[in-house]
Amino acid sequence: MFKNVEQLYLKTQDDVKIAINHNKTGHDEVLIIAHGWFMTKDSSYFTDMANVFSENFDVISFDFRGHGKSSGTYTFTSKEPMDMKAVVDYAKEHYKKIYLVGFSLGGALVLIHSAVEKDVTKVIAVSAPHSFIKIENQMWRKEAWWHSFRKFEFIRWTTVRPSLIIGKKIRPIDIVAKINVPTLFVAGDCDATVHAWHTMSLFRVAKCQKKFELFRGCCHAEDLFFQQRKRFIDVCTDWLKEEHSVETVQENRELQAVGGR
């Protein structure tokens, strides 16, 4: 982790304490990284990712409630929009350009925030689900259990505190058309947890300036960074740095290969 990382806590509207790492590298743009279920900002995946992205942006990573150093219990996107809002509100005090990148359920949450709050500049959703109820999560497949085992971090696993899954949730597919900023949708074609059709369905419904990137041979969420590190960083950085004047769509074989439901 870089030496110029400030660690602090924010409070949500319902008084949950959210732990953040603020990588200050002298940029006037900030990228907020939103992890998924069973990950934390201090996982080796996300500290490494934050450091790489810090070459081009200031970076804020944080723990959703029920993960890492944040308080509360995880509600699988029911109450986590309040966590996102607290972090974005903090970023707005320091930056005019705010970018979001979210992974898995974190991808769902950056889409929900962007559609509801309309206060960020650009969005990247990686392995974002169509809706929570539609997630297949086929953990018996070797593509899923092998990568879960490989990512095992004892300390991280002991910090996760889930709640019941019964809370009311916003379905990303119901709100994605309300997003009005450029949005990049990213998926792995070997994802056994959130199949690529989920993210593709969101891309198809979105009405904003948009692009879809399929990572062939890659699995779920942060695995894309691990498996194709340079391409992942380049694709994300190019999207955030690019001036978007017209709708951007990656057509034909990439889209047809994913299919849809």
Image (spheres, rainbow, N blue to C red):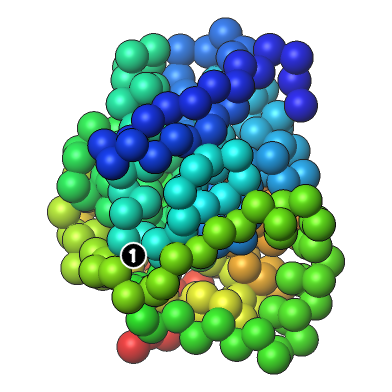
79 vs 48, nearest the viewer: 79
Residue at 53% x, 13% y is 27
Residue 131 at x, y percent in the picture: 34, 74
Would you say residue 175 is visible in this rendering? yes
Q: Residue furthest top?
A: 26
Classify 95 as above or below 114. Answer: above
Classify 148 as above or below 57. Answer: below
Residue 161 at x, y percent in the picture: 55, 59
Residue 96 at x, y percent in the picture: 32, 17
Q: In this view, does 149 lie to the left or right of 217?
A: right
Residue at 69% x, 91% y is 140
Residue 164 at x, y percent in the picture: 41, 72
Classify 8 as above or below 240. Answer: above
Location of the N terminus by quadrant is top right
Classify 113 as above or below 135. Answer: above
Residue at 60% x, 22% y is 7
**Which residue corresponds to mark 1?**
203
* Neighbours of disc 1 within 10 Å: few (<14), some (14-19), many (20+): many
259 vs 192, nearest the viewer: 192
Which element type, helix, strand or loop, lies under badge 1?
A: helix
Amino acid type for the residue under numbered disc 1: Phe
Q: Within the image, what quadrant is residue 38 found in?
A: bottom right
